[in-house]
Image: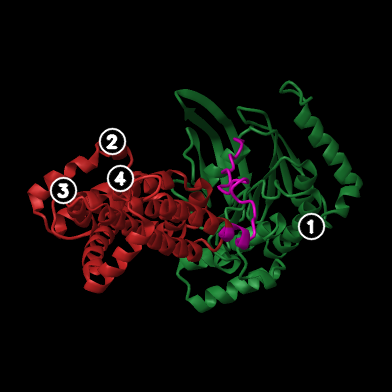
Chain colours: A red, B green
Amino acid sequence: MAANSKRASRASSFRDREYSPTSVWLGRIVVFVLLIGSWEVLSGRAFNAFWLSKPSLIATRIVDMLKDGDLWFHMSATLQEAIAGLAIGMVGGTLLGIGLAFSGIFERWIYPYMMALYSLPRVSLAPLFIVWFGIGLSSKILMVVAMVVFVAFYNAFEGMRNIDKDLMDMMSTYKAKWNHKLRWVVLPSITVWILTSIRLNIGMALIGSVIAELVGSNRGLGYYITYSSNMLDTTGIFTGLVLIMAIAVVLEQCVLLLERTLLRYR
Amino acid sequence: MAKDNQPKLSIQELAVEYRTKGQRTVALEGVNLDVKDGEFVSVVGPSGCGKSTLLKVAAGLLQPAAGAAYIDGEPIEDVPDRVGMVFQNDALLPWKTVLHNVRLPLAIKGLPDKEQVAEATRLLKMVGLEGFANFYPKQLSGGMRKRVALARTFAYDPDIYLMDEPFGPLDAQTRVKIGEQFLHIWESVGKSVLFITHDIEEAIALSDRVIVMTDRPGRIKAEFDIRLARPRPFYDIRFDPVFKELQKEIWAQMSSGAGGID
């Protein structure tokens, strides 16, 4: 009897060490204050504030933008592109991964080409998309899709390959049809992988939308950054970066929340 | 009604080969085996002798290289109806609660929700887990998980149980407890069982017949009829002189030839 290779548990011991939440959060706040504080203090003293701006200037700028409506005007554009592209790319890539894993030899034909496309620096496709679809929303969404679809595909595909074969055999012995297998075994098995790919892809989606905006657009945070850089307005550039970061953090927290509900059983 | 002399499961001149990286391994060769309706048959043998492979063929999960397996005289091609498999590692769905795991075969059969819950609850009570319906498998001990897996198979209510070292990963004490409980339930259900184990005592205590297999390629080396009265005390039967004698004979068969165990 072949030894049943038990799947190594994903919970590695060194990451799961327990610390009290207060010590974790206190440490985080200290790191934040140290970084931002030294930036604030050193800027204008150790180096010229014109090149590196200042946290207080950035904060003032955000408040100003909030007042005159610029903040929402640019942020909403970027957010819309990123989320629409993320949704399309995640669904498409995941379905492709599941489908290809089920497709037998077809997978062997397609896989190397998927990987070849993946290794393409997709950022360089942005000008092409703008030629095709203009500077509006669709070229940006397409760019985001191009950024996220491969990670989604790859994670779903690897997830499929890691499905516990005993569980599939078990379903077969109960004469389960494919839709039962999909709902009870396949989708729950790859949920971990899909959540990981969403988390990785939040950053990718923002890169995609901002790059596309840098190349050609008339709104969005990427546009705001290029515009500011043309004006030699470093505070504007940093403000754009801070806002992108804020979006990423908020989206990431949403996914964490989703993870907590979906992976309760662990 | 099936004729009394027709075996529930019949395996004839079975050979199974594995192919990995161009290498051909013969797992089973020339295996003949019948399990009669209501009979409890155990297969013992050294690790790697293809015992589990035998079970996978009977479950329709593996295609033989030669020979065939029949259930009620019908050749097994796809997964046959009314065959229940108990896996060595339980094969519980970690993302489903105990209740939902036990409901699974009933949900696949398409029973109404209410009946599913009622039946699953009844079976959980039978295996002594009534308070654990809403627990996830991870929250249970190995012995409890095993009982959930058994309850799930009982829910499917197969005509033949295929059990792949089901009590293997358990500690000695839990093993005896679960074995006793299973024997008790089985004696009231009375369905056929093909039971794979490497534990001779467990095999004798449970079975009507014990089959000894040789090392790879697996062949049947000897067969023993276990003429011990039922219902049996699963643990105390071990002190019966007939039991002792059988144990000695089976051990002699297992350890002779094949280069010896030590």
> Which residue, given by chain and number where applicable, does mark 4 sit on?
A150
Amino acid type, mark 4: Phe
- Give the mark toward the camera: 3 or 4: 3
> Which residue, given by chain and number where applicable, does mark 2 sit on?
A119
Earlier sequence position, callout 2 versus callout 3: 2
* Cα gap from disc 4 to disc 1, whole angstroms: 51 Å
Q: Mark 3 packing: few (<14 Cα in 10 Å), some, or many (20+)?
A: some
Amino acid type, mark 1: Lys
Numbered range of the magenta stretch = A1-26
> Which residue, given by chain and number where applicable, does mark 1 sit on?
B177
Q: Nearer the viewer, residue A50 or A61?
A: A50
Name the quadrant of the C terminus of chain A: bottom right
Q: Is residue A137 above or below residue B196?
A: below
Q: What subunit carries mark 1?
A: B
Amino acid type, mark 3: Val
Q: Main secondary structure of the magenta part?
A: loop
Q: Are marks 4 and 2 on the same chain?
A: yes
Earlier sequence position, callout 3 versus callout 4: 4
x and y percent of residue A111 in the render?
Answer: 30, 37
Name the quadrant of the N terminus of chain A: top right
Q: In the shown orientation, is residue B170 left or right of residue B59?
A: right
Contact between labelled residues 4 and 3, with CB atoms less than 8 Å apart: no
Q: Secondary structure at mark 3?
A: helix
Q: Is residue B230 above or below residue B35?
A: below
* Label placed on residue B50: none
Q: Residue at x 60, y 37 (%)?
A: B32
* Cα gap from disc 3 to disc 1, whole angstroms: 71 Å
